[in-house]
């Protein structure tokens, strides 16, 4: 069994994927804009990802823009049969690197075609509708127009499966009334646990939950508690935070990103990190204190 596969798999649409995945965002330049600092290293990281047994890569054509998808295609096309590439649409980049909302039907269709072209695919495995109302906290709002547009692209055969990102529980329910939802991608970590109930409900429904910013939003005191636990376990804080997420629920899929092969190996080693009861109690307490 490969290293990444030891964390087990979860069904993402019609595909079982390794729960330890890879996020490609950090392969782009500073602030996710422009080309990578080291092109050859970026290619090496992507090839190491699949060699490790990871079968889930998360990306978007607005990373760069176009940079990470073109790197993925250069490094990995023709793709392995067991590899699932998940992308997201709903934003576009300005010439100054700004992040701008792009959620009209025409903009969503254009984004799907950009992803297809740059990934060299005829159909996208999974597309997340990324809402950009507030990246740090989902904001309620009607998403029927965007979901209807994405469902039409699915009907045309350009998109196989649909997910939603940066959404509230009510928006997940609304989306499910328009198309089958296979994954939810929201901010969630030890300290930011507003989605506890959503994780449990998606688990019951067989929907994958993909947390982003696994170390985002920590207070100094919370960071200190995490660092002390990591030191006791002879691990890094990032490894402990990822290990806790793997333990939190079987439907959680991880997509830690890195532009370093050595850091990739550290992330994958998380699957073998044992969290004893006292460590779990300390880590659980970080989230409880934040509520």
Image (tube, rainbow, N blue to C red):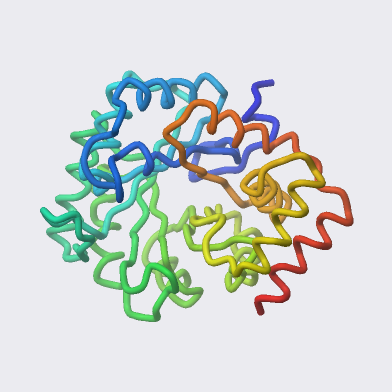
**Residue 31: percent from left, percent from top:** 30, 50
Residue at the image point whose x is 30% and y is 39% from the top: 28
Tell me: 275 left or right of 68. right
Which quadrant is the N terminus positioned in? Answer: top right
Residue at the image point whose x is 62% and y is 30% from the top: 4
Q: Quadrant of residue 158?
A: top left
Q: Nearer the viewer, residue 173 or 111?
A: 111
Tell me: 75 left or right of 227. left
Q: Quadrant of residue 30?
A: top left
Q: Nearer the viewer, residue 201 or 229?
A: 229
**Residue 48: percent from left, percent from top:** 48, 22
Q: Nearer the viewer, residue 55 or 38?
A: 38
Q: Quadrant of residue 273?
A: top right
**Residue 222: percent from left, percent from top:** 67, 66
Which quadrant is the C terminus positioned in? Answer: bottom right
Residue at the image point whose x is 70% and y is 57% from the top: 226
- 207, above or below 167, in the image: above
Residue at the image point whose x is 32% and y is 79% from the top: 142
**Residue 211: percent from left, percent from top:** 53, 56
Q: Residue furthest right?
A: 277
So how many labels did they put on this image?
Answer: 0
Q: Nearer the viewer, residue 172 or 217?
A: 217
């Amino acid at each position: 069994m490969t290293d990444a596969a030891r964390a087990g798999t979860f069904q993402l649409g019609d595909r079982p994927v390794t729960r330890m995945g890879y996020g490609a965002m950090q392969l782009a330049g500073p602030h996710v804009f422009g080309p990578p600092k080291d092109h050859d290293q970026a290619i090496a990281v992507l090839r190491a990802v699949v060699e490790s047994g990871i079968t889930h890569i998360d990306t978007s054509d607005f990373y760069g823009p176009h940079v990470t998808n073109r790197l993925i295609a250069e490094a990995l096309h023709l793709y392995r049969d067991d590899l699932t590439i998940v992308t997201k649409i709903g934003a576009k980049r300005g010439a100054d690197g700004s992040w701008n909302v792009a959620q009209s039907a025409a903009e969503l269709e254009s984004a799907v075609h950009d992803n297809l072209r740059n990934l060299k695919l005829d159909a996208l495995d999974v597309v997340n509708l990324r809402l950009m109302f507030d990246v740090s906290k989902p904001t309620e709002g009607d998403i029927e127009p965007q979901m209807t547009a994405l469902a039409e692209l699915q009907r045309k055969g350009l998109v196989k499966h649909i997910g939603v990102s940066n959404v509230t529980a009510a928006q997940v329910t609304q989306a499910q009334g328009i198309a089958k939802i296979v994954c939810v991608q929201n901010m969630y970590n030890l300290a930011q646990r507003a989605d506890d109930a959503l994780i449990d409900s998606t688990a019951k429904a067989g929907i994958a939950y993909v947390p982003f910013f696994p170390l985002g939003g920590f207070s100094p005191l919370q960071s200190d508690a995490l660092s002390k636990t990591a030191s006791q376990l002879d691990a890094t804080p990032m490894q402990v935070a990822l290990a806790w997420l793997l333990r939190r629920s079987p439907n959680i899929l991880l997509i830690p990103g890195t532009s370093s092969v050595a850091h990739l190996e550290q992330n994958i080693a998380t699957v073998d990190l044992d969290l004893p009861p006292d460590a779990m109690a300390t880590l659980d307490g970080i989230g409880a204190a934040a509520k």
